[in-house]
């Protein structure tokens, strides 16, 4: 018996399936896939047209399922689905007024337009469309802008971009020195000088002098992309936060665009949803026994951290873009390193139920730290004798001293 082919599915169903594959959206960041975006995917040849309106066509459900499983789905959307002004502002995490300043300054230009009928606001309107790749690249191609400060502006504040002058006409209006090209690529100036000398296809100067040449920014960015020196960001960087306590099960949270400040009091801030913020506030409220601990914090640009207790929410802040930013803090003295071991070399771990060993033993290879390491403590001021000793960290990062376990401290009186 021949099986019947599945019926075509509507563009709205396909958009919902793709959004589910992308994960839970936060108040800012990648805009959700719309039915119109499905039409762009059909015109790009990623989905077959099976009827309906060309703007929001019917598609094959199996093709949608295959597309949803592709790991490069975010890159495909960036490459083929343009963004309107509101979507572009959301992708950058800024207010619409800040996005309008980006356009005024000439940092980005429309790649097309679309006619939309705003029935309640005057009928048909021409809306510009922008390349999603160009939008995502803006924080990289404009390194002089404090994008974090721009994203966290309070409602009603004047955009700092309003004080800047727009670019002049022609290719000479948007140029970069070798030093700024290096900032875009995240390397030193000497590396760019070397690329220019070794690669014949490196862009030619359009202005400046032989000593201080200036290059068209767009040409430099295109060259860096073609040579894999930079990449289009797939999304906003995120941190993974795992909390636990004696009274609550382990909970996992995601914080987008995280900022980790390690000082006298460590602070972690990031964008999250209202529900996640409510849960974090409830878990870290005062009076919760021994307190809530960070079992593991994995954030870009820093080793994984662990914090044994007393983590608390210090701020909930809704920025002008509509996103909710939450800040957690803990005493810096509680911070440990939750990195895994590398071979026989301990690269760090949570310090708990252990005390500093006062001097290195004969077999201790630590040369940079006077204490020589940690010795397990049979008695803990928090848990008495009920907790097993832990020795998962060596302050100097050296090889663990086998003699430490033979020199346990004197047990405290009960």
Image (cartoon, grey):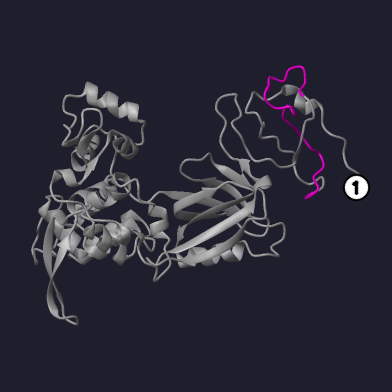
Q: Is residue 89 magenta?
A: no
| Residue 58 shows up from this direction | yes
Residue 211 sits above or below residue 256 on the image: above
Left or right placement of residue 282 versus residue 357 in this view: left
Q: Residues within 10 Å of mark 1 (few under 14, many from 20)?
A: few
Residue sticking out furthest to the right:
413
Residue 67: x, y in percent?
23, 50
Residue placed most toward the observer, 96 or 87: 96
Residue 205 sits above or below residue 311 on the image: above
Residue 44 sits above or below residue 227 on the image: below
Residue placed most toward the observer, 217 or 333: 217
Residue placed most toward the observer, 178 or 380: 178
Residue 48: quadrant of the picture: bottom left
| Residue 1 shows up from this direction | no
Q: Secondary structure at mark 1?
A: loop
Q: Residue at x 49, y 45 (%)?
A: 299
Q: Residue at x 80, y 45 (%)?
A: 380
Q: Main secondary structure of the magenta part?
A: loop
Residue 87: x, y in percent?
26, 62
Residue 102: quadrant of the picture: bottom left
Left or right placement of residue 226 versus residue 230 in this view: left
Left or right placement of residue 224 versus residue 370 in this view: left
Residue 292: x, y in percent?
64, 56
Q: Which residues are magenta?
A: 360-383
Which residue does the numbered mark 1 point to in the structure image? 414
């Amino acid at each position: 018996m021949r099986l019947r082919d599945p019926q075509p599915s509507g563009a709205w169903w396909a958009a919902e399936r793709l959004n589910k594959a992308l994960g839970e959206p936060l108040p800012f960041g990648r805009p959700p896939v719309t039915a119109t975006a499905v039409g762009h995917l059909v015109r790009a040849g990623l989905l077959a047209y099976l009827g309906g309106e060309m703007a929001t066509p019917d598609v094959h459900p199996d093709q949608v399922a295959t597309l949803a499983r592709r790991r490069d789905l975010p890159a495909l959307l960036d490459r083929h689905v343009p963004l309107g002004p509101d979507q572009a502002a959301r992708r950058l995490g800024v207010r619409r007024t800040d996005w309008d300043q980006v356009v005024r300054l000439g940092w980005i230009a429309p790649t097309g337009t679309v006619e939309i009928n705003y029935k309640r606001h005057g009928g048909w309107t021409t809306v510009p469309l922008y390349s999603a790749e160009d939008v995502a690249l803006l924080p990289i191609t404009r390194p002089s802008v404090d994008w974090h400060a721009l994203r966290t502006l309070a409602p009603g504040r004047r955009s700092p971009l309003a004080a800047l002058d727009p670019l002049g006409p022609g290719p000479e209006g948007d140029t970069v020195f070798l030093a700024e090209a290096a900032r875009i690529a995240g390397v030193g100036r000497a590396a760019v000088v070397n690329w220019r000398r070794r690669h014949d296809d490196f862009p030619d100067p359009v202005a400046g002098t032989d000593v201080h040449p200036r290059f068209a920014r767009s040409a430099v960015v295109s060259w860096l992309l073609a040579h894999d020196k930079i990449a289009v960001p797939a999304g906003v960087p995120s941190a993974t936060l795992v909390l636990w306590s004696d009274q609550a099960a382990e909970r996992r949270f995601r914080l987008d665009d995280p900022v980790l400040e390690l000082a006298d009091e460590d602070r972690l801030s990031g964008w999250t949803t209202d529900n996640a913020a409510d849960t974090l506030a409830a878990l870290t409220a005062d009076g919760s026994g021994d307190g809530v601990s960070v079992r593991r914090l994995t954030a870009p640009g820093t080793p994984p951290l662990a914090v044994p207790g007393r983590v608390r929410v210090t701020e909930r802040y809704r920025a002008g873009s509509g996103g909710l930013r939450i800040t957690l803090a803990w005493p810096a003295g509680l911070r440990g390193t939750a990195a895994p071991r590398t071979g026989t070399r301990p690269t760090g771990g949570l310090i708990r139920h252990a005390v500093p060993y006062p001097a290195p033993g004969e077999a201790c290879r630590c040369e940079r730290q006077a204490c020589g390491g940690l010795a397990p403590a049979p008695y803990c001021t928090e848990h008495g004798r009920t907790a097993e000793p832990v020795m998962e960290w060596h302050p100097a990062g050296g090889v663990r001293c086998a003699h430490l376990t033979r020199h346990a401290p004197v047990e405290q009186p009960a």
